[in-house]
Amino acid sequence: MTKYVIQGGKSLHGQVEISGAKNAAVAILPAALLVDGTCRIENIPQISDVTLILKILQDLGADVRTVNRNTVDIDCSHIRNAPVSYEFARKIRASYYLIGALLGRFGFAEVPPPGGCNLGGRPIDQHIKGFVAMGADVDVSGGFIHATAANGRMQGAQVYLDMVSVGATMNIMLAAALAEGLTIIENAAKEPHIVDLANFLNSMGADIMGAGTDIIKIRGVQRLGGGTYSIIPDQIEAGTYMACVASAGGEVVIQNVIPKHLDCITAKLLEMGVEVEEQDDAVLVRSHGSLQRTNVKTQPYPGFPTDMQPQIAAALCVAEGTSVITEGVWDNRYKYVDELRRMGAQIQVDGKVAVIEGVEHLTGAPVSACDLRAGAALIIAGLGAEGCTEIDSVQHIERGYEDIVRKLSALGADIRVVITPDDLRQSQAV
């Protein structure tokens, strides 16, 4: 078992470089299935979700070659249309992008239902609605999602999403890139990683317009060729380090970011009394003294991102006054609250609303990461707490954060990895 052990109370100083965006990478890598030739993808984050997707691509017959730590060459010229491994797919939510990519490439897909973090009901009905509108038959049987294009090739169609869905928007884009005719997605999501996927596909020869607005038009092409593409910086990783500074105090330059993508996060931190200065491709974050209360409601981009909700909550635990967080996206994103309460946080949850009464300080305690962003929240709380915090189930954190222990240590945090051998754990249990 691997734990993160944090001795709190040390302010952060220095510079940290943000990795490529997880939410972009997990869609762009499956998009390589649509490319007839070699595509070089740069600025790939070294996280477990990316490792799993690359394994799935290799299992399907892709030639994946590592160029350097954050760059891979992927050649899917000889890919075969086989069922996606259940063992791999069940560990990752983004495995559903393989449905759209395989439908686009072959007109057929056989993919297990997605896994990943349990954030309550996360149906893929909007994805299926899009596929069906484009001429696919979709059913779930034998533990797999089976999707077949009626005419062997997806057909352009007009798709109105009943709710703004990042996953459905991107999945329909994948299915439409090689479809026959024009596909129009209405009520599309606008997140930066949707624009990044469109830019990747366009750089390989696709014809996609309107990404970043609520109407996206995809005119199918006969073929996508190879090329080179660099993934955008991770908005959520950058926001997480901003929240770390807010909690622990200090002054940190967060490099390799697109400041515009951080506007919604920056605005809340400014309300909390944190200083944020934008630079060309960096932000300077400075926090000294007490944090102030604020209210947060998560919304689709450009609103405050749901993937930053646990992190901002952790920082608000020690803000002066009462803060209210309203979760506007997922049904079950407050499971981490019990862990923060172990550290002395005063939080009451009623449905999608959390009321946080700020306390003078949190106290270190043994806690468990129940999902990716919850784990980041516990790190933030531990950095600012008095005493020692031990976080287990850190495999969730490593799904989305590259080298987080090394990066925080370089900023002056007292954080280390502790590995308990299995035989020792078993003997302690006896």
Image (cartoon, rainbow, N blue to C red):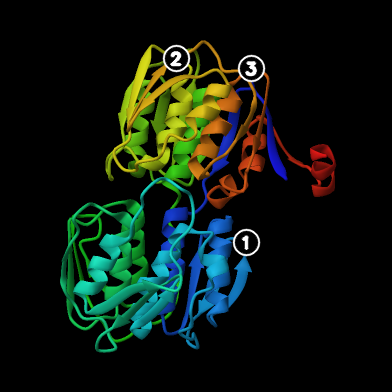
Of mark 1 and mark 3, the one earlier in the sequence is 1
Pick the residue in front: 87 or 97.
87
Position of residue 105 relative to residue 116, above or below, is below
Question: Would residue 54 be seen by someone viewing this image from the given angle?
Answer: no
Q: Position of residue 153 (x, y in %)?
A: 27, 86
2 or 1: tag closer to the N-terminus: 1
N-terminal label among 2 and 3: 2
Three-letter amino acid code of the residue under disc 1? Arg
Inspect this view and state whether residue 321 appears.
Answer: yes
- Tell me the kind of residue under disc 2: Gly
Point out residue 83 in the picture as x, y percentages from the top left corner: 48, 79
Image point (36%, 19%), residue name: 323
Residue at 56% x, 66% y is: 88
What is the count of numbered marks?
A: 3
Residue ID for mark 3: 386
Quadrant of the drawing holding the C terminus? top right
Question: For mark 2, what is the residue?
Answer: 358
Question: CA separation, marks 2 and 1?
Answer: 41 Å
The CA distance from mark 1 to mark 3 is 36 Å
Residues at discs 2 and 3 in contact (Cβ within 8 Å): no
Report the front residue among 205 and 183.
183
Mark 2 residue crowding within 10 angstroms, few (<14) / some (14–19) / many (20+) = many
Judging depth in this view, the residue of 315 and 213 nearest the camera is 315
User: What's the amino acid at mark 3?
Assistant: Glu
Q: Are marks 1 and 3 in contact (CB under 8 Å)?
A: no
Look at mark 1 in the image and give the residue it sits on.
69
Tell me the quarter of the picture where residue 207 sits. bottom left
Left or right? Give the position of 210 relative to 415: left
